[in-house]
Image (cartoon, grey):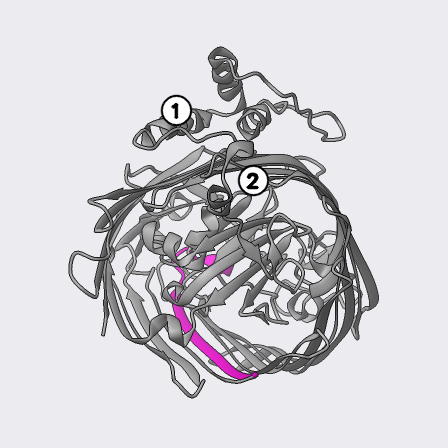
Amino acid sequence: MTLQLFIAFIRVSRYTSGLGGVSLRVAGPEPSVRKRALRDASPLAEVLAFLMAVAPMMTQAEQPAPPLLNLSIKELSEITVDSVFAASKFTQKVTDAPSSVSIRTRADIKSFGYRTLADIIRGVPGFDVTYDRAYSYMGVRGFNSLGDYGSRVLLLVDGHRMNDPIYDSAQVGTEALLDVDLIERVEFVRGPGSSIYGSNAFFGVISVVTRRGRDVNGVEASTSGGSYDTYSGRLTIGKQLDCGLEYLFSATMYASEGPDRLFYKEYDSPLTNRGIALHQDGDKYWSALGKVSYGDFSLQGGYVTRDKNVPTGSYGSVFNTSHPQMDSRGYVELRYTHEMVDGWSLNSRVTYDFYDYHEASILDRERIQDTAQARWWSAEIGASRKFFDCLHLSLGAELRQTNDLHQNEFVERPFRSDLNLKSSQMVVGTYLDSRWELCKSLSLSGGLRWDHYNTFGDTVNPRAALVWQPSEKTTLKLLFGDAFRAPNAYQLNYNALDQRANPDLQPETIRSYEIVAEEYFNNHWRGKVSLFRNEIKGLIDTVTEPGGFYKFDNNGNATVNGAEAEIEGSWKNGMLLRASYTRQQATGGQTGGWLVNSPEDMVKAQLSVPLFTDKLSASLEVLYASKRLTLAGNRTPDAWLLNLTLLSAKIVPNLEFSASIYNLLGREFSVPGGEEHLQDAIKQDGRTFRVKLTYRF
């Protein structure tokens, strides 16, 4: 059934109606129909056809799986269904969650050689990452606004909000707080999440769950080296003591020289070194994470500082000169969780966060310093309980106070202050979320949250989901939700050079509709098909005013219609196969046409195969994105990557070795450049490699 749904999805109409609707037609399994459907859908849909063709060969050593109804209780128990917490702030099966959910685990990170959270995100259906040689910008389902800093996705680390109040940045590249070696799992929750999380949960929530002390159970040391003189080292200590005390401490250092030469045709002049940036792409950071827990209390904190030299001449800086941008992010959190005797689960936390930004550039022979800092604290309390075995309630409240929002810009010599602005922000929110099991196969979820901002006032955001499970392994979901993203301090107040403040800026909003069909079958396989529509209003974007100045304003609407399909197979011996295809039509903005930096088609596939039992494995990842519109109205070529990783975990006791080649075929590809860049499109790295060693004491 799910295979037919997957083939049917590929046949979704290539061109939608004026309303952006899609049509879905279940196709028969005849090879000729399947081949024609794949050919019509995408130039790289043949990848899916190939993977689907080889899948039976990978399991030829196993006996054919019996129909689901004929499986024994033991065989049924082997069909595992992941659990998710971030979808509703309580643990539930992904099939029960009122969202479309994907999970990536520590095993995935090791098998596919992921180096950053951005690498993990690139491999998830519907998600996209754009790297402009300064930051990695995250997009979801056809919407990836240039210079957005990932503000329309809420990023959580162990439930802690990582988006800052100045730029709303969700940092996922080398600027991210967390070394991926410390990640146990990542939950990707698609769709509006403002009904329980408030701002930034616009297109979805990414929740990172870190490893515990017991998972390390000793000392780990890791080192890696790769292309462009890239080196890193990590030391982690973790343990759970007999008395119940558990701790984990970890520190990481990273440095990369970057490519020696980067050529940009826009600067091809004798005055700008013929467009060649020499040794201008360096990147380095160090980060730390610590956590201690005892009983119901836990204390956790993290810190990262990253220094990146930007080679593109962004913001009008003099090309081929040092242009460092430094970001520092940290937090400390005290948490209390308790299971009460009457069935209530209580969660509360008090946190203190900080963020610092510093940029130094040369502009018109003047050395300009641009800085920003934020200091804020927050308190949150939540509780959940199940009543009468059919109703699960969650409720909570949150207070976030930012007392120090400071944006500063000045010229060093002779000193001139262009901006010295201090502001504050207060956010109060409260929510109620519920899941009601109407009968054994049907449940209804609903949620509502109210938020108050001292900058613009009140906003209320609901969501609802109807989940039907006609059989034990088949799930159908009807999803609806509203969300908002509040304007940040930079968009509201920045008033220097050619930018003007807009204190009247209002939140942008989204209304989302989605249908999801998911099925587990034949012991090893899971298939999922989604149809979605996102309606965005009051889109925050820049507008040009008389005199050449620009400001942020609510100056446009956008609509995204699409469909998404995924199939996954996993086996006890460690073999894994995933393949997905996303078709999306994103229109609107200031022009009303196709959105900038929005690929129409995305194909993603991962294959991991054990070689020599559990001693060695090989993993292959295929990533494809179709053409993207640039700000100048051009189109970047189709981009596709092939990444290969070999992983050895048990050849030498306690030693883990991996070797990865990224962009194996050396394909050239570019992504659109933002308004701060002279380049219409920014070329990405070619073939690179990394080798890594991890030893456990």
Q: Residue at x 41, y 71 (%)?
A: 306
| Quarter of the image with the C terminus in it | bottom left
Q: Amino acid at mark 1?
A: Ala
Question: Which stretch did the figure color magenta?
Answer: 296-316
- Callout 1: SS: helix
Asked if residue 219 lies left or right of residue 363, the reply is: left
Q: Residue at x 33, y 55 (%)?
A: 110
Mark found first going from the N terminus, 2 or 1: 1
How dense is the environment of label 1, judged by Cα within 10 Å: few (below 14), some, or many (20 and up)? few
Asked if residue 221 lies left or right of residue 305, the reply is: left
Residue under circle 1?
Answer: 53
Image coordinates for residue 372, horizontal then vertical, percent:
56, 76
Mainly helix, strand or loop, the magenta region?
A: strand
Q: Name the quadrant containing residue 20.
A: top right
Image coordinates for residue 177, horizontal then vertical, percent:
45, 70
Asked if residue 684 lies left or right of residue 358, the reply is: left
Q: Amino acid at mark 2?
A: Ala
Residue under circle 2?
Answer: 632
The answer to whether residue 441 is above or below residue 32 is below
